[in-house]
Amino acid sequence: MVSLLQLGAVLDAVDLGSIAVSAALFVAGFVVVYLLGMALFVPAVRRLLGSKGFDEAVRSLATSVARAVVWVGAVAIAFTVAGFGAFLSAFAVFGGAIALAIGFAAQDLLGNFVAGVFILKDKPFEVGDWIEWDGNAGRVEDIDLRVTRVRTFDNERVTVPNGDLANDAVTNPVAYETLRQKFVFGIGYEDDIDAATDIIIEEAEAHADILDDPGPSVRLVELGDSAVGLQSRWWIEDPDRGDFVQVRSEYVQRVKERFDAAGIDMPYVHRELTGSVEVLERAAE
């Protein structure tokens, strides 16, 4: 009877010792991998993205992801070192299935997220830029990893998914230091084209905000039903939405006033209806 008790005690001691060894191996493996990952892997990821010119938001996100990878890697290696490889394999299969299901459910969200990363990297526009897309226009207020917030010129906030801005054409009129503007002035068929052209050029050259180099130009672009179209082209420096509208308005108004003073007509389309109306009277019964 004593020998059986002693044997049970020995077996319990062996089980406890095995568990203690496995626990020690798990802790040691986790600590070693975690410390090495945080000291080497995470800084290396941040330096790599910095050398590639990624935005701070992308680097911060990548740092968080790298830390999560270090945690998962440390746990996985700790389980393997401790001798729980079968459990780890089963957990990996289950985790893969969950990740696949989440990926299908959130594919639009992930698409916008990836698009946000490319927008921050490629910088087709930046905060403060005036952009135009899909018939809309406004000034960029904030670029997030999922959406971009734009303030319209009617003082409305539009939240645009990054996927829309990354996959469709976006116009950035303020991407360069200068911007060319165009406007078509219509004059009558009886008016002098050369005289009208001189007025258009002179008013452009006289405007303080219109550049001399490149200089303004005029092209005859259309012979309409009631007018000859002269397209004026001019350049402004450091384009901004307010400057764009103001310069255009002032310049067109001055040309209109010069045309009026010179007797140059700016005709508009009119229609003349001809015919007759026949009225039938029916005697009341």
Image (tube, rainbow, N blue to C red):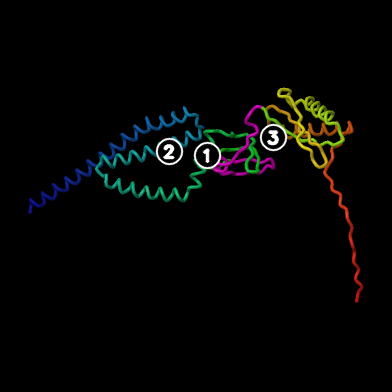
Look at the numbered disc 3 and give the secondary structure of its residue.
helix
Alpha-carbon span between mark 1 and mark 3? 25 Å
Q: Which quadrant would the C terminus be assigned to in this image?
A: bottom right
The vertical placement of 80 against 262, above or below, is: below
1 and 2 marks in contact (CB < 8 Å): no
The vertical placement of 226 against 205, above or below, is: below
Tell me, yes or no, whether the highlighted magenta stretch contains residue 82: no
Q: Horizontally, is 212 left or right of 132 in the view? A: right
Alpha-carbon span between mark 1 and mark 2? 16 Å
Front position in the image: 35 or 153: 153
Residue drawn 81% across and 36% down?
228
Q: Position of residue 158 (x, y in %)?
A: 62, 44
Q: Horizontally, is 19 left or right of 223 in the view? A: left
Mark 1 is surrounded, within 10 Å at the Cα level, by few (under 14), some (14 to 19) or many (20 or more) other residues, namely many
Q: Horizontally, is 153 left or right of 89 in the view? A: right
Q: Amino acid at mark 2?
A: Val
Q: Which residue is mark 1?
A: 116
Residue drawn 65% across and 32% down?
174
| Magenta segment boundaries in residue numbering | 149-177
**Which residue is at the far bottom?**
285
Front position in the image: 118 or 8: 118
Mark 3 is surrounded, within 10 Å at the Cα level, by few (under 14), some (14 to 19) or many (20 or more) other residues, namely some
Q: Which residue is mark 3?
A: 241
Q: Amino acid at mark 1?
A: Gly
Q: Position of residue 181 (x, y in %)?
A: 72, 32
Mark 2 is surrounded, within 10 Å at the Cα level, by few (under 14), some (14 to 19) or many (20 or more) other residues, namely some
Alpha-carbon span between mark 3 and mark 2? 39 Å
Look at the numbered disc 1 and give the secondary structure of its residue.
helix
3 and 2 marks in contact (CB < 8 Å): no
- Image quadrant in which you'd find residue 284: bottom right
Q: Residue 65, which numbered label?
A: 2
Q: Earlier in the sequence, mark 3 or mark 2?
A: 2
